[in-house]
């Protein structure tokens, strides 16, 4: 048997052995914890009032509002675009204010009022903004349209209540919905078809009727 005092080990190999030992010790408890937690999902019962109708659901705590609407309630008018809050396709009205449904958890809104594109109008009785989008060809492929319209509804309400934007000239007077003001307020909604001019015309038409 070789005498331990005669064994030679380089500094490099010593460091490798130490790192391997530390990794093995660290990953074993972590793997065990993951295995123990696998398959265990915490849920909560949530009641939404969506488009005037109450819905009670048992949801995984990680479920976004967007997935609750699309996957559980089958309200697929609300679109999943970027899923990062950058395109606006998932915009809905939450307690009357526009939000990106992909960025908020469903369990955070128990008991609240939610309006999706399905709740704004019907084929026989379109919301004024829906009708204006049709007249001005503001929808094109239609994917971003639900978010655009919900956002525009919220934007018009914000302006009516005097909420300023970065483009608002006066903070003490009711904002004038100029093209620049509308563009600023709608800047969070992206149209890949580039129908911005038509969308602007549609919103301006409705805004003038509300002035």
Image (tube, grey):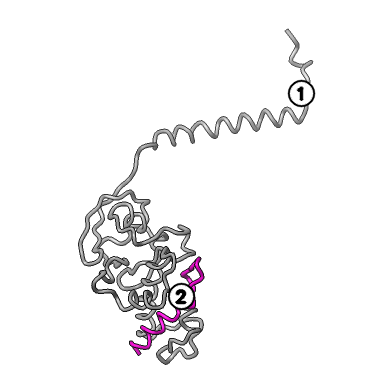
Residue highlighted by disc 2: 186
**Front of the two marks 2 and 1:** 2
How many marks do you count on the picture? 2
Q: Quadrant of the C terminus?
A: bottom left
Please tell me whether residue 192 belongs to the stretch shown in magenta.
yes
Q: Earlier in the sequence, mark 2 or mark 1?
A: 1
Viewed as shown, does residue 178 lie left or right of 105?
right
The part of the chain drawn in magenta is 187-211
Viewed as shown, does residue 147 lie left or right of 192?
left
Give the quarter of the image for residue 107. bottom left
Viewed as shown, does residue 15 lie left or right of 200?
right
Q: Is residue 117 above or below residue 132?
A: above
Residue extending furthest top? 1
Q: Nearer the viewer, residue 192 or 66?
A: 192
Residue highlighted by disc 1: 9
Badge 2 local density, few (<14 within 10 Å), some, or many (20+)?
some
Q: Is disc 2 in contact with disc 1, using a CB cutoff of under 8 Å?
A: no
Residue at point 74%, 15% (across, down): 4
Position of residue 86 measured from the top left corner of the image (x, y, whole percent): 49, 64
Residue at point 23%, 58% (across, down): 47
- Which SS does the magenta portion mostly show? helix
Q: Is residue 178 above or below residue 107?
A: below
Q: Quadrant of the N terminus?
A: top right
Position of residue 108 measured from the top left corner of the image (x, y, whole percent): 33, 60
Position of residue 10 measured from the top left corner of the image (x, y, whole percent): 78, 26
What is the secondary structure assignment of the residue under circle 1?
A: loop
Q: Nearer the viewer, residue 26 or 49?
A: 49
Give the quarter of the image for residue 149. bottom left
Q: Nearer the viewer, residue 103 or 136?
A: 136
What is the secondary structure assignment of the residue under circle 2?
A: loop
């Amino acid at each position: 048997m070789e005498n331990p005092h005669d064994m030679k080990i380089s500094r490099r190999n010593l460091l490798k052995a130490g790192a391997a030992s530390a990794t093995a010790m660290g990953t074993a408890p972590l793997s065990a914890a993951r295995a123990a937690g696998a398959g265990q999902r915490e849920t909560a019962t949530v009641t939404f009032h969506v488009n005037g109708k109450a819905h009670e659901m048992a949801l995984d705590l990680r479920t976004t509002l967007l997935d609750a609407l699309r996957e559980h309630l089958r309200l697929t008018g609300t679109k999943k675009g970027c899923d990062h809050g950058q395109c606006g396709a998932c915009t809905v009205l939450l307690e009357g204010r526009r939000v990106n449904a992909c960025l908020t958890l469903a369990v955070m809104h128990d008991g609240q009022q939610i309006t999706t594109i399905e709740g704004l109008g019907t084929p026989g009785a379109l919301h004024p903004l829906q009708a204006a989008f049709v007249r001005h060809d503001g929808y094109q492929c239609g994917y971003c349209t639900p978010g655009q319209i919900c956002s525009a509804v919220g934007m018009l309400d914000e302006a009516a209540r005097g909420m300023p934007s970065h483009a608002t000239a006066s903070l003490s007077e009711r904002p004038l919905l100029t093209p620049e003001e509308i563009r600023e307020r709608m800047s969070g909604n992206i149209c890949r078809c580039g129908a911005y001019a038509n969308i602007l015309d549609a919103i301006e038409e409705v805004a003038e009727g509300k002035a």
